[in-house]
């Protein structure tokens, strides 16, 4: 563990240098240098069902959104990085916009979430981020009626594959969920992925 990082959370799962874990809580209160928001092709930031995001506009969300919109139209399944105007006091250096919605309010598709997760991790690497907090894309950025399992599997599988493939700079990835059962499902999926693809037989 590098100096300056908090102790490894209880129950976290390690993939090489990168520790992953899931929590119920505030996206902006995870001590992460980068935070991920779902976006649509216009760069408009979608809603995220975590408490801290309610205050994103007074904290600078409008300026962040305007910066993202200057790069529109955006392609589904991609990610862009902007500054974090107004969020610096929370320790945030960059906002990563994961383009998972065709239009505001339209449900995300699993295939777009898969590609956006990979694009997000690549964007974090280019931005030299070491800690990242992201919502459960496609679930906690939706109506709450979405079946979480395909989106949990997509996020976990693509995260593990990306970490294994490219050894990114990220020391810590926090998946911030709305409900405890989403946390449990996410951590179970990460544990399965580690056992299946990471631990090699001797």
Image (tube, grey):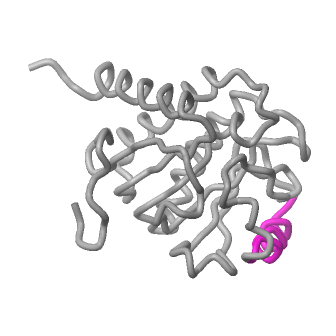
Compared across the picture, whether 18 is left or right of 1 comes to right
Which is nearer the eye, 133 or 15? 133
55 shown above or below 155: below
Depth check: give the residue in front, 25 or 27. 25
Q: Count of labels shown?
A: 0
Q: Is residue 141 above or below residue 199?
A: below
Q: Quadrant of the N terminus?
A: bottom left
Residue at x 85% of width, y 58% of height: 44
In the image, is residue 99 part of the stretch drawn in magenta?
A: no
Question: Based on the displayed image, in which of its 4 quarters is residue 69 positioned?
Answer: bottom right
In which quadrant of the rendered image does the C terminus lie?
top left
Q: Position of residue 71 (x, y in %)?
A: 81, 66
**Residue 2 position within the rendered picture, expressed as x and y whole percent measured from the top left:** 24, 66
For image coordinates 43% across by 61% down, the residue present is 131
Give residue 97's position: percent from left, percent from top.
Answer: 70, 57
Q: Residue at x 73, y 49 (%)?
A: 48
| Residue at (85% x, 61% y) in the render | 72
Residue 109 in picture, x, y percent from top left = 76, 29
Observer-nearest residue: 95 or 91? 91
The chief SS type of the magenta part is helix
| Relative side of 150 to 195, left or right | right
Q: Which residues are magenta?
A: 60-72
């Amino acid at each position: 563990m590098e100096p300056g990082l908090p102790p490894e959370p209880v129950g976290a799962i390690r993939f090489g240098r990168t520790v992953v874990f899931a929590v119920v809580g505030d996206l902006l209160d995870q001590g992460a240098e980068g935070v991920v928001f779902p976006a649509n092709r216009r760069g408009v930031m979608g809603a995220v069902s975590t408490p801290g995001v309610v205050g994103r506009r007074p904290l600078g969300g409008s300026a962040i959104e305007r910066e993202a919109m200057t790069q529109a139209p955006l392609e589904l399944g991609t990610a862009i990085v902007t500054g974090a105007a107004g969020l610096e006091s929370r320790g945030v250096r960059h906002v990563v916009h994961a383009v998972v919605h065709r239009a505001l309010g339209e449900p995300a598709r699993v295939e777009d979430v898969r590609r956006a997760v990979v694009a997000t991790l690549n964007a974090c690497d280019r931005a030299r981020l070491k800690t990242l907090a992201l919502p459960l894309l496609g679930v906690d950025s939706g109506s709450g009626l979405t079946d979480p399992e395909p989106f949990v599997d997509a996020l976990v599988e693509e995260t593990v594959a990306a970490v294994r493939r490219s050894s990114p700079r990220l020391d810590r990835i926090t998946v911030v969920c709305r409900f405890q059962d989403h946390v449990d499902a996410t951590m179970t999926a990460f544990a399965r992925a580690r056992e299946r693809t990471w631990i090699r037989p001797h």
